[in-house]
Amino acid sequence: MYHELTVWSRGIIMDKEARDVSTCIATAARKLGYHAENVSDYIDDPDRTNCLVRRYARFSDEPILDRFVYENPHPDWIVLVEETIIKAVNFFRGTPPGGGVLVINSARDPQYLLRFLPGSMLARLDRLVVVDATGLAEQRGSSPWMFVRDLSELAFDRMSTEGAVERLAIGRGIAAPLIGALVAATGDLPVDAVADVVADRDAMLRGAKQHTVVQYAAA
């Protein structure tokens, strides 16, 4: 078994959410005995507010030989931390035909979201997974911020220094339901085992139960 996970997000304001998704998947896979890697975006990381950024994870039952290839060459699991990224970039670049599992944080109808994918990208789609991660995450404070965190936390948890340690819990907020939907829809990692490394276990389990899957390739 071998999977490449690429999480697309936007710089600074949503970066932690993306990091948490890739970190929890890699950590859980490693605890289950797989070889796993979790790397940042060394390719085109602008580290600027709202600019597209990526976080990567890979896991395999065989040793990963390309450990220092930072960009996933053939991502088959793709997570969009917010829905407008569906129109922003070809996130299926390198994905095998009919092999991509796409998870989107959205409350919209999956058929509506499919309209934004051109034919060349639809040809690489296996499953579309839609989860309202924002609605399923635990609300914190009184901020109307989309990602259910007080704005002051953005400065607190920003990791711009190589090798810095996370200062906030890993796997809370919208990251938790996104992880749950991804793990439940793919079925390669046990939901309970992944939940053990997610800070907001309840929100992760809500995402595992409350998501919609469109099996596109079969259709």
Image (cartoon, rainbow, N blue to C red):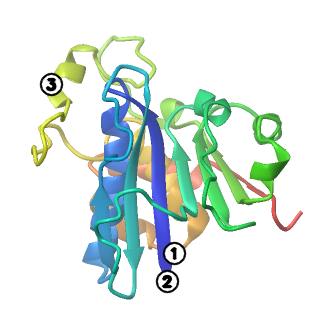
Q: Which residue is mark 1?
A: 188
Q: Decide if residue 129 is on the left or right side of residue 12.
A: right
Residue drawn at x 49%, y 83% as measured from the top left: 1
Residue nearest the observer in this picture, 202 or 37: 37
Amino acid bearing label 2? Met
- Which quadrant of the figure has residue 132? top right
Q: Amino acid at mark 3?
A: Phe
The residue where tag 2 is placed is 1
The percent coordinates of residue 126 (x first, y second) are: 73, 63
Query: Can you give x and y, in whole percent of width and height, for residue 147 in the image?
Result: 41, 25
Q: How many marks?
A: 3
**Position of 201 compared to 72: left or right?**
left
Residue at 35%, 64% in the rendered image: 69
In terms of image quadrants, where is residue 15? top left
Mark-to-mark CA distance, 3 and 1 = 34 Å
Vertical placement of residue 41 versus 154, above or below: below
Q: Is residue 78 above or below residue 12?
A: below
Task: Give the image location of residue 171, x and y in percent.
Answer: 31, 46
Tell me, yes or no, if residue 208 can be seen here: no
Which of the two labelled residues, at mark 1 and mark 2, occupies the earlier sequence position? 2
**Viewer-proximal residue, 125 or 218?**
125
Marks 1/2: CA–CA distance: 9 Å
Q: Is residue 112 visible?
A: yes
Q: Nearer the viewer, mark 1 or mark 2?
A: 2
| CB within 8 Å, label 1 to label 2 | yes
Disc 2 is placed on an element classified as: loop
Label number found at residue 156: 3
| Local crowd size for mark 2, using a 10 Å CA cut-off: few (<14), some (14–19), many (≥20) | few
